[in-house]
Amino acid sequence: MSKDREHFDDYREQTRIKHEILTKYFTPYFLIRAKAPGENLVYIDGFAGAGTYQTDDGAEHGSPLRALSAFADFKPSVAKKMFAIFVEKDKVLFKRLDAAVAEHFKTLDGLRPPAVVCGAFDEHVTGLLDRIKLKKTRLAPSFLFADPCGVDGLCFATLTRYLRDGDGEALLFFNYSGVNRIAGLPFKPGKTLSKLLGDDDTAEELAKLVKGGTPEERENAIVSCYLSALTTAVPDLYCTAFRVEHEDKKATSHYLIHLSRDARGFRIMKEVMWKLGDTDGGSGGLALEQASTAVGAPLFRPEWDQLKESILATLTKGQRDVDYFYTALSENRGNRLCAPAYKQALLELESEERILVRNRFGVPTTANTRMKRLGAPTLGKGHCVALTP
């Protein structure tokens, strides 16, 4: 049995988190895009797989079925605009996918029948863009989910063309462990690494960079090289990388990378990822650390200390509305922080009596006097913060 097929024999925690990130983001994404004129919204799953995962408790829905269920829950005016395309090249997996989608679609109302295609991601998406170009039009607002089981198949030229010529965003699976292994092998022009990074020169340069480096240096070089290649090909791109650790060792397995040309999408995706993240510094973050979190809570949190000090430095220049941190700073390209991170840091600074909080009327408030959510104090928009005198 191929490794791609074996992947669907188990539904792991990291797969669940991946699907949570996907559905929790494209729901607000499509609801926002539906407000613009137009009759179509397009969702493309470029490596749709079998449609379901087999577990001891029965079948678990994969990304295609989860997407259809989410679209069926949209209000009717949005649901009827949704057109889903599921692409799978493995003929055995495609047969299972086609049957699973057909069976699941019978249980849903208000949706257009999806297109289930047997073929390669790059060939199908390229063909779609070619046909649209001939019509002298553009792809409708869209979202692409590209989740190959390995390194092969995620063609750089196809991905960047979709981002440039289409009107959409992408969430992709970047198989770091596989790329790390390939980058350490003797360089071969035109092969997998070149297709992933866009050209032979970039691939060869990366192969040189990773030789002799520490594991951390290799990881930084590989991820930075890939994101740099993407932003060079699509200059106005915002990139968010969510790191996933192996379950049984403190090493990176893969990254989920979100690509958007919109600052608001960049901010919202970071918030979705952050809330589902889990690191050795506590819940939340742009990472799912599995082996590292098994040892318990850390004694020191240098990243949080740095964040709080940066907030205090900003407040030396005067009072700030919390939305400055939640929105303005969060939408800065390259900023990995987001509203949940700033909110947690501000609440900690307040509890340490290092900042004061005022409501929209300028009246001082405390964590005890403000509304609580799930037993924890809130710090919503409209509040201002300043240094404690």
Image: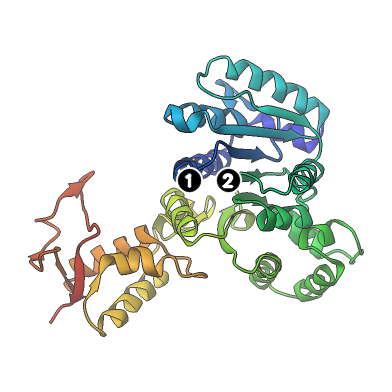
Q: Which residue is mark 2?
A: 141
N-terminal-most mark, 2 or 1:
1
Apparent side of residue 139 relative to residue 81 in the rendered image (left or right): right
Position of the C terminus, as image quadrant, is: bottom left
Residue 211 lies in what quarter of the image?
bottom right
343 vs 358, left or right, is right
* Residue occupying the point 62% across, 57% down: 252
Against 14, residue 92 (above or below) is above
The reply, left or right, for residue 205 in relation to residue 330 is: right
Q: Residue 87: name its quadrant.
A: top right
Instruction: Give 78 or 222, whichever is nearer the viewer.
Output: 78
Give the label on residue 123, or none.
none
* Residue 195, x across and y down, in percent: 82, 58
Residue at 41% x, 61% y is: 281
Image spot of residue 249 (x, y percent): 61, 53
Tell me if residue 42 comes above or below residue 223 in the rendering. Answer: above
Residue 121 locus on image (x, y percent): 77, 42
Q: Residues within 10 Å of mark 2 (few under 14, many from 20)?
A: many
Q: Quadrant of residue 160?
A: bottom right
Residue 346's spot in the image, x, y percent? 26, 66
Q: Secondary structure at mark 2?
A: loop
Q: Answer few, some or many: residues within 10 Å of disc 1's Cα (few below 14, many 20 plus, some between 14 and 19).
A: few
Which circle marks residue 36 in the picture?
1
**In the figure, 175 relative to 90: above or below?**
below
